[in-house]
Image (cartoon, rainbow, N blue to C red):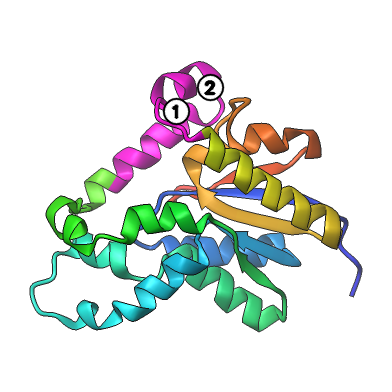
Amino acid sequence: MKALRQELILVGTVHRAPKGYESLIKVLYAERPEVITVEVSPYGLRFRKKKRELLEKDGLPLGLKAYLEIPYEYKAAKDYGVDQGIPVIPIDLCWYSKRFLRDLKELFINYVEGSVSSFLEQYRIALLCWDDPILARAFLKHLDPKREKALAKRVFSIFVRLEKRLMHIGGWTHMLPLPETLFGLLRPLNPKRILLLPEGER
């Protein structure tokens, strides 16, 4: 098999989107990465595995169930990684995941009930902001610069060390064209950006 040239590919996703797995698995096989990093932390994966029994409870709101499931981004990456024999690395910050997931009571109180229309609205916003720094700046008001720098540093370190075709999969807001986002910080590497769209809209 012909060796692939080293390249960084950034895939922006809408978290918990219906059919996200199906869309992402197609992109993975089309782009053929040799290493994958995913915006999920080891803590987040352990937390969700421990709470797996909650998914079987009757009457659990769909929005909350989506929060407790293993993210489709990781599922698709892991399935592709096993099939191709390549590493899949969860690189998000454990302290961030702990802050987000630690208090299950708060999740029950504050869960967001996702709907097809709300996800389509997120896609529309993502499309508008994707190549427009002015709109991206107006939308992205609560970026955590510490987290962006840490994620970018981890992706950069793996990319330079392994010298392979690396795909990073994460939320679309991290890939917006602003200097302080993960994409902006990694821009010197000339990454390829892909916005993961719903089936039938690519």
Q: Give the range drawn in magenta.
A: 119-144
Of residues 19 and 16, which is closer to you in this image? 16
State the image coordinates of residue 91 (x, y, percent, origin top left).
Answer: 59, 59
Q: Which mark is residue 128?
A: 1
Q: Do the residues labelled 2 and 1 touch (CB within 8 Å)?
A: yes
Q: Where is residue 179 in the image (x, y as percent from the top left)?
A: 63, 25
Q: Which residue is drawn at 91% across and 69% down?
A: 2
Give yes or no for residue 180 being in the magenta stretch: no
Is 135 contained in the magenta span? Answer: yes
Q: Is residue 34 left or right of residue 111?
A: right
* Mark 2 residue crowding within 10 angstroms, few (<14) / some (14–19) / many (20+): few
Residue carrying label 2 = 132
The answer to whether residue 107 shows anywhere in this view is yes
Q: Distance between the residues labelled 2 and 1?
A: 7 Å
Q: Say above or below: 76 vs 152.
A: below
The amino acid pointed to by label 1 is Leu
